[in-house]
Amino acid sequence: MKRLDWDTGLDEGPKVTYECEHNASLCLGCGLCAAFCPMDCYEMRPTPTGIDTPTGEMPVSVAPERCVGCKTCEGQCPVNALRITGSGPAYDPFENREKAPALPPEEQARYSEWAQVLKESLQLRSEPVAVTLVPAGAPLPDVPVPSMRLRYCQQLAYARLGRSIMLPPNRHSCPDGTSILGMTDVPPKLASGELYLLFQKLDTMEAASQMMAERPRLPQRSIDATVATPLAKAAAAPDVVVVVGDAEQMMWLTMSASYYTGKRFNYRVSGYNSLCVEATLIPREEQTMNLSLGCYGCRAASDLPADQMFMGISTAMMPTVISGLRQLSKKAIPESRAKIYLPPL
């Protein structure tokens, strides 16, 4: 296994690699690309003869093998002087790995029924998503591995539109997500909280350090892949079901979970690490449900509408949620949506 300065999940063998196309005629030499790169792929160096920038420096890709294709540098460049392109064969790290048997028909039917109840009762715009984190060394479900890299939030965005996708570490493009979900180590710029300040999402290093200290993560190399499919087509027993919806739909999900107990929920919401921490890790590890408003990353990297948010529900809670939702659908939901107490206009 190839090791760099920290464990990035990279390994020997052919894989999708990334190249930086740099237009020196546009470059300002501002250094934002080098500062924002979470994998430290760039260094700022003096410009060669014949090339001028306002600062006398330009970025040089000194560690291209670290690039995960997150395109943060591309997005932060104020003059669009950078383009990140992928190339190389699609390396399958699971080529000789044991495959998991298909789900029993009765289990598949149960997940399909859950999806139908969620979609019909809540009038969802998209599919509920089944999320499975494959433990290290475990058999793999029969789910396609794409040739391109995706962020975890993008993987779920595709799944809610009907796609089934499995991502090993070398198909993930967000080192934040892979470190949280137990696939890789945390790159130094993320571990220190430095990037939160660069993105101007927090005020001080103290605040950034606090954010990192409160952020849970699974043990490094404990997970081999993330699997996301439409719940109705689940290929593996889900750890968590993620529902995308608006505030009213999240209200009914909350009420369905408390239908039999009347208990209130203490959701852990921050606006950071939405899908990886709030909608996946917390429900999975604490066997609960958790609301997430989304985050900078998932909203910047997907087509998530501004009014949509997430609810992550542990599989253990799903029978209660589905049963409660069925009861609420008999009277409470239709009456509320009919605005029965709204005075005539």
Image (spheres, rainbow, N blue to C red):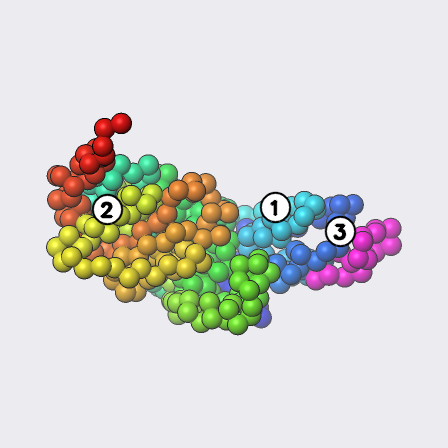
Residue 258 visible, this orientation: yes
SS under mark 1: strand
Which residue is farthest right?
49
The amino acid pointed to by label 3 is Leu
Which residue position is annotated with label 3? 28
- Label 2 to label 3, Cα distance in Å? 51 Å
The amino acid pointed to by label 2 is Trp
Residue 85 is labelled as: 1
From the viewer's perspective, tell me whether residue 32 is left or right of residue 106: right
Residue 234 visible, this orientation: no
Instruction: Please tell me which residue is depicted at 47% across the width and 47% down the height of the picture.
Output: 299
Instruction: Please tell me which residue is depicted at 78% across the width and 45% down the height of the picture.
Output: 25
Which residue position is annotated with label 2? 252
Residue 51 counted in the magenta span: yes
Secondary structure mostly seen in magenta is: loop
Q: Position of residue 24 (x, y in %)?
A: 77, 48
Mark 2 and mark 3 in contact? Answer it, CB < 8 Å. no
Q: Position of residue 150 (x, y in %)?
A: 48, 49
